[in-house]
Amino acid sequence: MDSFSNNSNDPSQELKSFLSENNPSTLSFQKKTAVLLENELRSTVAFPRVTPRPLREKIAEIIALEVLFGQTYEIKDPDKFIGRFGAFYPLYLTLRNSKSWPKIRKIANKSQGAGLACLKILLPLFYEVLDKFSEFSDGELDCELKELNTEMEKLILEFEMLLQETFFLRGGFSDSVFPGRPGGPESLQERVPAFMQLTGSQAFLESILQELFLRMEGFVSEMEENLELFETLTLLFPGRNWSYSVNELKKEPFYIQLKMLKRYSEFFEQNPDLKKIVDFIGRREFDPPNGPARLSPYGKTRIQTVKFSGAIDNLLPMEAAKLLNPALKKKFYADMLEGKLLSYKFLGKHFTGPPRLKPRGPLIALVDTSGSMHGSPQTLAKAAVLAITKQMLRQKRDVKVILFASVSQHLEIELSSNKMMAEKFLNFLLYTFGGGTDFNTALASGLKSLKEKDFRGADLLFITDGKSEISDELVLARWEGTKKRYNTRIYSLIVGGEGAGGLSEISDYTYLVKMDVGREEKSGVVRLLEVKTKDDEPEIR
């Protein structure tokens, strides 16, 4: 049964029916595509055009399925596809066979943000080909089209008729829009393959898509060079449209910030020890499994009975006492070999089902910007903050960066659902460290932020050279109370120093790192010297 005839006004249901006939496993991707059309791609698809909106939605769904989700759209029944999508069929095949298509899919696989940006470029250009095609018949032909002079008129007229039939079928137009009502799906199933067999039809299709191909090639070139930069910008500036030209990002003064952004990103990627620290700070924890707890022999919270066994881990004390008597010692070993030692049989709670991933809360990074941090510590601090921020934003976790030096030098940069101070964050990468240091005020600022709605339960991260002193007893007392209330932890990343100073008293985890500076202090190798925990001995790495 052809469900399209009963659901002509429901594009999602129509595509779902077609996909289920061809590949049921793609249904979950179809649901994700429907969400994209309702959100990120809504304005792109909804923009008024000559091409009927139902057809625009079908085109967006099919192309998004291939680009964003890496699902090859397999057309098992071309006649049925042509009967539903008409003139889109030869255009789609031409697009899919272009040399840029696999490169775009590869880029989208690395970054969904880049894939969405590509769709926001590709779809309008594709729609414009359909909308403006009739202009070609007025003599506005590309050079490549003029070379097809002998067959051009026939190709143009036939393709225009195919488009009219497709628009009429998919858009529900009245006879006044297309006088002399075109045929239905059966007509398209005959005429589309016939058009594709005409001499020069493939060159004709490639020519009318030439502008789209050129833009795709330009996008691929831009993204291959700036993919990491683009991904960072989409995290820092959500909702902002970077899709039309990454080259626009290279204009002053923004370009200076982006150069620094790229520099610190590359610095982080080149230092595996720094990546270890960031991964640990940004880790996620596990809750017990979702399944119910049941009594199991794997648990040992209660004694059920006494049994004979050959194991010695759950022995009754009277059995172990035999080892003290030379005569009974041989009896003990004999019973052990025969499995006749009296042992406790334990039971206990055992959870069923897989463990649940417990999302971590937000993070407050307190960055020492005093004069002692100038040079290589400054480079390492900025790279670490950038890397941590990117990781937190990818996990949909809020971040606040507090820059502190003396009492009067204090700046807060918030990247949360309520505030996106991304411009200030980029300025931080250009900021030159200098001045004195006041750790009391810094800790007090962190504690104050923990009371904010977006940062309750956040962890604190100090980045400093270790010359720290926290002498305010009131602040320390507030910290102890806050830690118990919010289960907050403090991490300290000590850059180039020999110890954490006053931070050692309050830090749950302390990382001591050393940076072997490269030329002009713009590069270097970060080495993790040791990891200290508050309760354990230092762990040398």
Image (cartoon, rainbow, N blue to C red):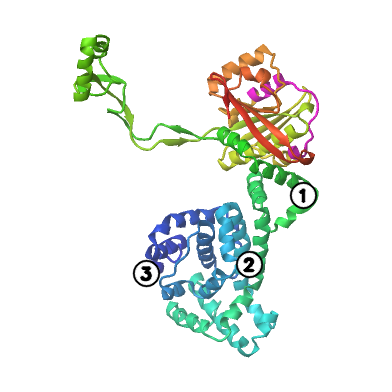
For the residue pair 218 and 456, the one nearer the viewer reads as 218
Provide the residue designation for mark 3: 2
Look at discs 2 and 1 and give the one toward the viewer.
1
Distance of mark 1 from mark 3, alpha carbons? 55 Å
Q: Is the magenta stretch mostly helix, strand or loop?
A: helix
Distance of mark 2 from mark 1, alpha carbons? 28 Å
Q: What residue type is labelled 2?
A: Leu
Tell me the quarter of the picture where residue 99 sits.
bottom right
Vertical placement of residue 95 versus 453, above or below? below
Q: What element carries label 1?
A: helix
Quadrant (top left, top right, bottom left, bottom right) of the C terminus: top right
Mark number, residue 472? none
Provide the residue designation for mark 2: 125
- Residue 274 x/y as whole percent: 63, 36
Provide the residue designation for mark 1: 255
- Residue 30 x/y as whole percent: 46, 57
Give the mark nearer the N terminus: 2 vs 1: 2
- Residue 425 x/y as whole percent: 71, 39
Tell me the quarter of the picture where residue 516 sits.
top right
